[in-house]
Amino acid sequence: MMKTIRILLLITLVAGLSSCGSTIIVANHPQAQIYVNGVYEGTGTARITRAGIPKRTQLEAVLNHEVVAQREIRRQFDGAALFGGFFTYGIGFFTLWRYPKEVHLNANEGFPSRPEENIWERPPGSR
């Protein structure tokens, strides 16, 4: 009976953690193309696998062939990794680290700034 409960608990844990979902990457400009470690993942929003081994990931938002936002994220050790490690004979301590649930790329900070047009420097008759 105790062994059955352990097996059911382990199956529930593995199913719950394996389907823990994705990290959602959102650019604040809907036309920005999102690249994860140099690989295109989506326009405006993208998803990457949330759980895994400890890892750093470089995110970029590209608009009009120009990088307008960059951010590095990394997986963190949290309660899921701690809890999972006890039920997976320690494997979860190394394989259940997680990225944040949602990451925002603020593309406004990196948009190329257009210089203010000085109307006094325009040629006569132009608008």
Image (spheres, helix red, strand yellow):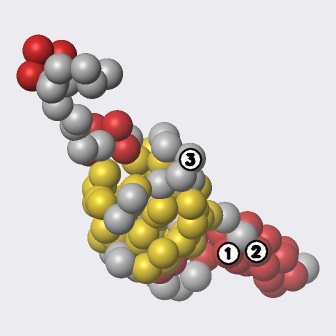
Which residue is most to the left?
121
Residue annotated with mark 3: 30
Q: Residue at x 35, y 65 (%)?
A: 65
**CB atoms of marks 1 and 3 within 8 Å:** no
Q: Residue at x 47, y 54 (%)?
A: 32
The disc labelled 2 sits on which kind of residue?
Answer: Ala
The disc labelled 3 sits on which kind of residue?
Answer: Pro
In which quadrant of the rendered image does the N terminus lie? bottom right
Q: Earlier in the sequence, mark 2 or mark 3?
A: 2
* Looking at the image, residue 47 lies above or below residue 110: below
* Looking at the image, residue 55 lies above or below residue 126: below
Element class at badge 3 = loop
Mark 2: give few (<14), some (14-19) or many (20+) Cα within 10 Å.
few
In which quadrant of the rendered image does the C terminus lie? top left
Element class at badge 1 = helix
Instruction: Determine which of the numbered discs, if any, sits on residue 15 in the image.
Output: 2
Instruction: Determine which of the numbered discs, if any, sits on residue 18 in the image.
Output: 1
Image quarter for residue 114?
Answer: top left
Q: Residue at x 40, y 56 (%)?
A: 63
Q: Position of residue 121 (x, y in %)?
A: 9, 22
**CB atoms of marks 2 and 1 within 8 Å:** yes
Pick whichever, 22 or 15, lies toward us: 22
Pick whichever, 86 or 33, lies toward us: 33
Mark 1: give few (<14), some (14-19) or many (20+) Cα within 10 Å.
some
Image quarter for residue 3?
Answer: bottom right
Q: Position of residue 82 (x, y in %)?
A: 48, 64
